[in-house]
Amino acid sequence: MSMALPVLTQGCVLLFVALAIQAARSDWACFIIPNHLPLAIVGLWAVYSLLQWLQGYAPTAIAVSAGMAVIVFSVGFGLFAANLFGGGDVKLLAAASLWAAPDWIPQFVMIVAMSGAVLGIAFMMPAFGNLPRDGHHSAVATVETDAKEPRLKRKIPYGTAIAVGCAAIALRLLNLFPFGAQS
C-alpha cells in the first residue's frame, strides 16, 4: 500500500493538469470556463490532500492552502467586479491556487501574470486577435465582434494563462520544475 499512495498522488496531479487544459481549451474556444471544471479541480484537490495527509503531510499546510485560495478568490472577485477578469477565470484561478503550496503562490501568480501579459499583447495584434477558434461553438460571431472592437477592449481567454500556471504547479509537485522543487 505504501507504493500505491505516491502513484495515486501523481495521478491526481496529472488529472489536475488535464482539467486545467480542458478549461483553457473551452476558454479559448468560446470564452467560457464551465463551472464543473473548477469544481472538479477543487474536488480532486480534496482527494490529493487526503493522499498527502496519509503520507504524513501536515494538515495545517492543507488548511493554509485553502485559506490562500480564499484570498485569491477574494482578489479575483475584485477584478471581476472591476470587469477586468471573467467569473470563470476567477474560479479557475482560485481552484488552481489550492494546488500551489502557500509558499509557491507568488510564483504561480507571477507565471499566470506573465503568461496573461504575453496573451494580452498577442491579442492586441490585429491578425492574432482575429484568429478563428476551434470548439463546439461557432467562432464566426466572435471573430466578427472582435474585429469591430478596439484592440484594447477585446476579450482575452485568460484560462489559457492560468493553465500555464497549473502546468508549472504540476511540474513542481512532480519535482520536475527546474527551481523551487517540493521537498
Image: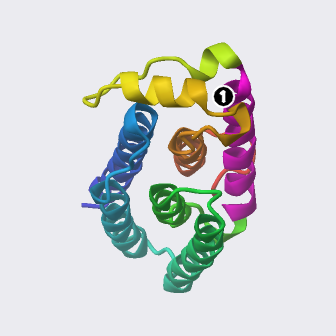
Q: Quadrant of residue 79?
A: bottom right
Left or right, 113 with reference to 127 = right
Q: Is residue 98 above or below residue 130?
A: below
User: Which residue is the extreme one toward the top?
Assistant: 127
- Res. 180 visible in picture: yes
x and y, in percent, of residue 9 in the image: 37, 55
| Residue at x-position 39% and y-position 44% | 23
Mark 1 is surrounded, within 10 Å at the Cα level, by few (under 14), some (14 to 19) or many (20 or more) other residues, namely many
Residues 76 and 152: in front is 152
Residues 74 and 112: in front is 74
Magenta range: 104-125
x and y, in percent, of residue 11 in the image: 33, 47
| Residue at x-position 58% and y-position 39% | 156
Left or right, 117 with reference to 92 = right
Q: Is residue 179 above or below residue 87?
A: above
Q: Given the image, on which type of amino acid does mark 1 rest?
A: Phe
Left or right, 94 with reference to 39 = right
Query: Looking at the figure, which quarter contains the N terminus?
Result: bottom left
- Res. 178 visible in picture: no
Provide the residue designation for mark 1.
Answer: 123
Residue 158 within the segment the image draws in magenta: no
User: Which residue is the extreme one toward the front?
Assistant: 148
Query: Looking at the figure, which quarter contains the C terminus?
Result: bottom right
